[in-house]
Image (cartoon, rainbow, N blue to C red):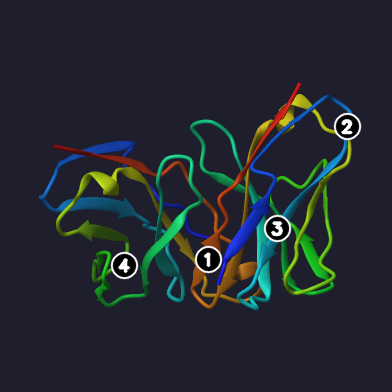
Amino acid sequence: DAKTTQPTSMDCAEGRAANLPCNHSTISGNEYVYWYRQIHSQGPQYIIHGLKNNETNEMASLIITEDRKSSTLILPHATLRDTAVYYCIVRLPYGGSQGNLIFGKGTKLSVKP
Amino acid sequence: NAGVTQTPKFQVLKTGQSMTLQCAQDMNHEYMSWYRQDPGMGLRLIHYSVGAGITDQGEVPNGYNVSRSTTEDFPLRLLSAAPSQTSVYFCASRKRNEQFFGPGTRLTVL
């Protein structure tokens, strides 16, 4: 699986957009980008995933650069409840051991009033 | 659906004791896995299963055993607990591209 690089921490003002970057310069052509978050002491929660097109769901948007070497997770209107550690993970799509998630240390996002 | 459930929530063991962490899911997912998370670290994969009767090792399998006799249950056994196994343990199941995690078991080994 491709490795990812994320900033250790970020701050965001409540109500503003939170933009979390992720570098994955060694991503292969059929690997997807996944985002999970972990709110204090809870189990991680799936947010969104994508291959090469931008994706949006009720939680967030995922912007993947054209060369696929980096991506940005966007929380459009951050709230205090979005304070969490956000993990960017690159892997092959589901199927056997290829479905294993390899977690790095993630980005700790602090949303401030 | 209850999703992924784990018991117990907290456990304290003495070195050398054995115990089983329970994990169950009611979503009929074939894939299940166990992770451990140490302070300030991301999750590390211990064991996983792609279906009943099939298990395999992850990144940090030493000191742990698993079995998968049913689709619903995936217990994690600590054979002889050591202080290095003090951690938070998360169980997960997967449907297609989304993994669902349980609430975790906080284990302390004295």
Q: Which residue is mark 4?
A: A68
Measured from the top left, where is residue B21 in percent x and y? 75, 48
Q: CA distance from mark 2 to mark 4?
A: 48 Å
Mark drawn on residue B23: 3
Q: Do the residues marked 4 and 1 share a common chain?
A: no
Q: CA distance from mark 4 to mark 1?
A: 23 Å
Q: Which residue is mark 2?
A: B17
Q: CA distance from mark 3 to mark 1?
A: 14 Å
Q: Chain of mark 4?
A: A
Q: Which residue is mark 1?
A: B99
Give the SS element for disc 4: loop
Q: Do the residues marked 3 and 1 share a common chain?
A: yes
**Is residue A42 depicted above or below A56 in this figure?**
above
Which amino acid is tagged 3? Cys
Which amino acid is tagged 1? Gln
Whether residue B100 sits left or right of residue A113 in the image: it is right
Q: Are marks 4 and 3 in contact (CB under 8 Å)?
A: no
